[in-house]
Amino acid sequence: GYNGTLLRTFQGHNDRIYKVAISPDGQTIASASGDKTVRLWGTDGTLLNTLQGHSDRVYNVAISPDGKTIASASWDATVKQWSWEGTLLTTLRGHQDLVYGVAISRDGKTIASASWDGTVRLWKPDGIILTRLRGHSDLVWAVAISRDGKTIASASWDQTVKLWNKDGSLQTTLSGHSARVLGIAISPDGEMIASASADNTIKLWNRNGSLLKTLTNHSSAVLAVVFSSDGEMMASASADKTIKLWKRDGTLITTLNGHSDRIYGLAFKKDGTLIASGSWDKTVKLWQPDGTLITTLKGHHDRVYSVAISPDGETIASASWDRTIKLWKRDGTLITTLNGHQAGVLAVVFSPDGNRIASASYDKTVKLWKQDGTLLTTLKGHSDGVLAVVFSPDGEMLASASGDNTVIVWNLDQVLDLDQLLIYGCNWIKDYLNTNSEVNDVCHP
């Protein structure tokens, strides 16, 4: 205390402690230790998290002014940036000797590090993550972005839907479901939000959050809901093994029957002439809007959680708990299988131009692929399984929802354009390449 009274002793490190930092809100203390870890503590002495990843003693630690990230400096010659949940976001390499000091700028966009190699380096490691949406009290199962890109909707097991501005500020919270919310969709004109829930209902809301109507025709949990591209029709998928098509006003048009297990995946072709569905029965089915079954795609070895149709309508993507994404022709021919995730894949989506595919997995990552199946990059930032992913209509952002109760909005300028990625990479390491006498490479983007 201010009078010199000892309030509390924190015990847990296995070696000497070199540095402590206090979060801006005063509720958390970070400590850096010779045991190669950073530990996060509550002010009551509770150990909240242990950040492990350095290969030598950690000599310094800093907390960003917004309290969302942590930077650590180590004798292993690296600086590491961590999310508040303890996920390693990036490792900054370039120093040629022990790193003793680290600091984060007031705006949180620059990290400074000081080393025994006689240099201070400035880093901008956070360009990929635009913002992290925090506010749900349980896992976020679904996410959607309005056509104008200004609103992000998230659906959570905490029984609410939240509408956010893309800068991370909360617009409003939609409360009314009596069970987990499992699906979310925003109409193309942005005037209506549809939410699907384990309470067996779909709720229709206006953009201000007022409840317009509740649809009660499903006999079990409603697992997904989507709008057609013209906004005049909706489709819903349920654990009752059916798909229902609705008019915009909530009038039931027809019911599609054919799957033998619950249906999680649902997508409209852009012109509304094709519907794709993915089920726990391990199949993908293609339908005409009148309910006629066109074909069944078989090839997955486990539950199918998500489907997507390319903007040109020629390719169908499916994501499965078997850890793969499969790309199909409309006639059911398998084009290719995308392998790389280390756990079940829960979501897949095409970019607006159809040239990229994003997949979300329980392995805590989002992967970006070319349409031919070539892996572009892996996005790491969530501390739990990633359950949903969606592109912004302009293709410049990606939003991912996770079991860590958050949504991350990613800046795709850094990862989708290969030329830009090369430039970004060169800018990142050019000082190292140009000043290190032992490296002959020069970066020419």
Image (tube, rainbow, N blue to C red):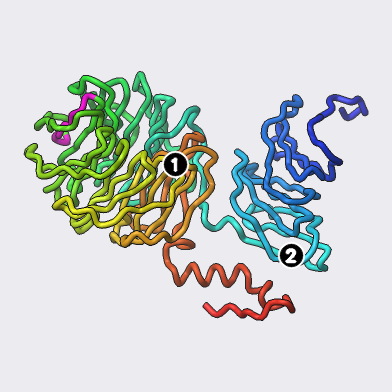
Please say whether residue 243 is one of the residues in the magenta stretch.
yes
* Magenta-drawn segment: 240-248
Q: Is residue 194 visible?
A: no
Residue located farthest toward the right when viewing the structure as drawn: 4
Residue depicted at x 47% and y 69%? 420
Secondary structure beneath label 1: loop
| Residue 410 % position (x, y) | 47, 52
* Image spot of residue 404 (x, y percent): 51, 35
Q: In the displayed structure, does residue 304 sit left or right of residue 252?
A: right
Give the residue at mark 2.
95
Secondary structure beneath label 2: loop
Quadrant showing the N terminus? top right
Q: Identify which residue is drawn at 49% across, 67% down.
A: 421
Query: Which residue does the image show at 41% across and 56% down from the upper left?
Result: 368
Comparing 157 with 233, the one in front is 157
Task: Kindly identify the amino acid type of the residue bearing the numbered disc 2.
Answer: His
Q: Quadrant of residue 319?
A: top left
Helix, strand or loop: magenta stretch: strand
Is residue 295 shown above or below 8?
below
Residue at mark 2 to residue at mark 1: CA–CA distance: 35 Å
Instruction: Name the residue at 27% across, 27% down.
Output: 222
- The numbered disc on residue 343 is 1
**Residue 353 location in percent, x, y?**
29, 61
Give the image location of residue 371, x and y in percent.
31, 60
Residue 75, by quadrant, is: bottom right
